[in-house]
Structures are given as C-alpha cells and as structure tokens.
Image (cartoon, helix red, strand yellow):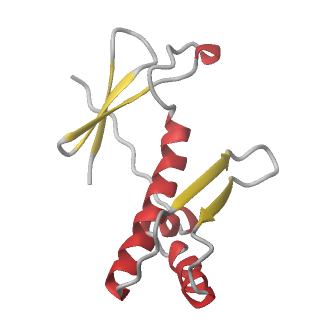
Amino acid sequence: MKAIARRTRRTLKHFIEIGSHSVTSDEPYEHGGTNAGPNPQELLAASLASCSAATMEMYAQRKGWDIGDVVVEVDYEPAQRGSPTSFRMAVRLPKELPQEQRDKLMQIVAKCPVHRTLEGEVMFEERLELV
C-alpha cells in the first residue's frame, strides 16, 4: 500500500494519490492553509471510522444479517504532553437489531485493520531522496 502526497503551489494543500484514487488534504485557514480538504489528522479519524463501518458491514454480510444503516463517528484528540492520543468512537446501529448481533458487531469493530494498527506497535523508516 502506498500513498504519495504532492504539495501544490507552495501551499499547505496536498494532492494525495492512493492507488488509482486521489484525495486533497489541507490545513484550516487558522493554520495557514486554504481549507481545501481535511487535514491529515482528520484523514486519520476518517480512516478509522470508515474501516470500522466497513468491517462490521462485511461481517454482517457474511453472517446474512441485515443490519440496516450503520454510522460510525470518531472523535480524535492528538497526544498532548503527558497524555496519550485518544479516539472516541460512537457506533450507531438500528435499535431493532437483536442484542446478540449488537454485541458481536461491537466486538468486530475493534478488529478492523486500522484499529489494530493504531493500537499495535508501529515502526517507521524514513529516508531522504534528492531529486
């Protein structure tokens, strides 16, 4: 999996290529950006929300469950000195779903690949390439 970010015209706005897809990321006006897209931290929260929803929906499909509309809301608070990064997730499921299905889906939501990546050990390798 590869993502490439390219800055546009000496701004904080970046075009991001992910496979055959493109996304725009930017900073809000108050941080010197043009607010042309979500900032990188918002993209991180969006990744967790969308991965969680998709994981639950794929599980429900495999089980043959009709779970109706699913909404996953993620609130993200970056780490501050002395406190860890915090993600608060609200999963909204139809109240008509049986309790057993709701319980299982809440177990499954914590198994999405992005959730597991964020809670696991992460390693970075950076290198400089001159062009």
Q: Is residue 9 above or below residue 53?
A: above
Q: Residue furthest top?
A: 9
Q: Residue at x 52, y 65 (%)?
A: 115
Q: Nearer the viewer, residue 30 or 126?
A: 30
Q: Position of residue 33 (x, y in %)?
A: 52, 15
Left of 53 or right of it: where is 28? right
Q: Quadrant of the N terminus?
A: bottom left
Query: In the picture, residue 119 is in which quadrant?
Result: bottom right
Q: Residue furthest left?
A: 20
Q: Residue furthest right?
A: 82
Q: Position of residue 37 (x, y in %)?
A: 45, 27
Q: Position of residue 15 (x, y in %)?
A: 32, 27
Q: Residue at x 27, y 32 (%)?
A: 129
Q: Residue at x 46, y 63 (%)?
A: 53
Left of 18 or right of it: where is 55? right
Q: Nearer the viewer, residue 23 or 53?
A: 53
Q: Position of residue 24 (x, y in %)?
A: 37, 28
Q: Residue at x 17, y 42 (%)?
A: 20
Number of disc labels: 0
Left of 46 or right of it: where is 7? left
Q: Residue furthest front?
A: 96
Q: Is residue 53 above or below residue 30?
A: below
Q: Quadrant of the C terminus?
A: top left
